[in-house]
Image (spheres, rainbow, N blue to C red):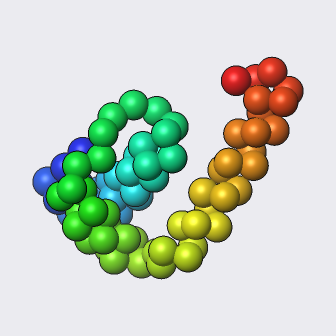
Amino acid sequence: HHKPGKAAIEHSKLVSTIYIADYYCQAEGLGYGVIQPEDQNLLKECMKLVEIKPHALKIIFDSVQVELAQMEDKGLL
């Protein structure tokens, strides 16, 4: 998932989706890793491939933050 452009064509959308999720988790401090400057261009390519707009990602990750907070409140994290 670190190099989605190298994925087989039949897996390209899945791998791109995982790349997008990984990128945003790193950007939000969830998980490990460092975002590199070239990652921004790759992110845009992946978003285009899976046909998702930036505002949609914001909605998704706002929901993820809420879910994580609820899990933490319940002692699950």
Quadrant housing residue 67: top right
- Residue ranking furthest to the right: 74
Residue 50 coordinates in the image, percent (x, y): 39, 71
Instruction: Kindly tell me whether residue 41 is visible in this rendering.
Output: yes
Viewer-nearest residue: 25 or 10: 25
Residue at position x 68%, y 48% from top? 65
Picture quarter containing residue 57?
bottom right
Residue 8 location in percent, x, y?
19, 56
Screen quadrant of the C terminus: top right
**Nearer the observer, 25 or 17:** 25
Examine the rendered structure and indicate whether residue 61 appears above or below residue 29: below
Q: Residue at x 18, y 58 (%)?
A: 38
In this rendering, is residue 19 above or below 47? above
Residue 16 vs residue 68: left or right?
A: left
Tell me residue 28's x, y (percent): 51, 47
List x then y, in percent, for residue 40: 27, 62
Q: Judge left or right: residue 49 versus residue 54.
A: left
Looking at the rendering, in which quadrant would you find the N terminus? top left
Tell me the residue at 46%/33% (across/down): 31
Farthest left residue in view: 6
The residue located at (33%, 77%) in the rendering is 48
Res 18 seen here: no
Number of numbered labels in the structure image? 0
Above or below, comparing residue 33 to residue 22 in the picture: above
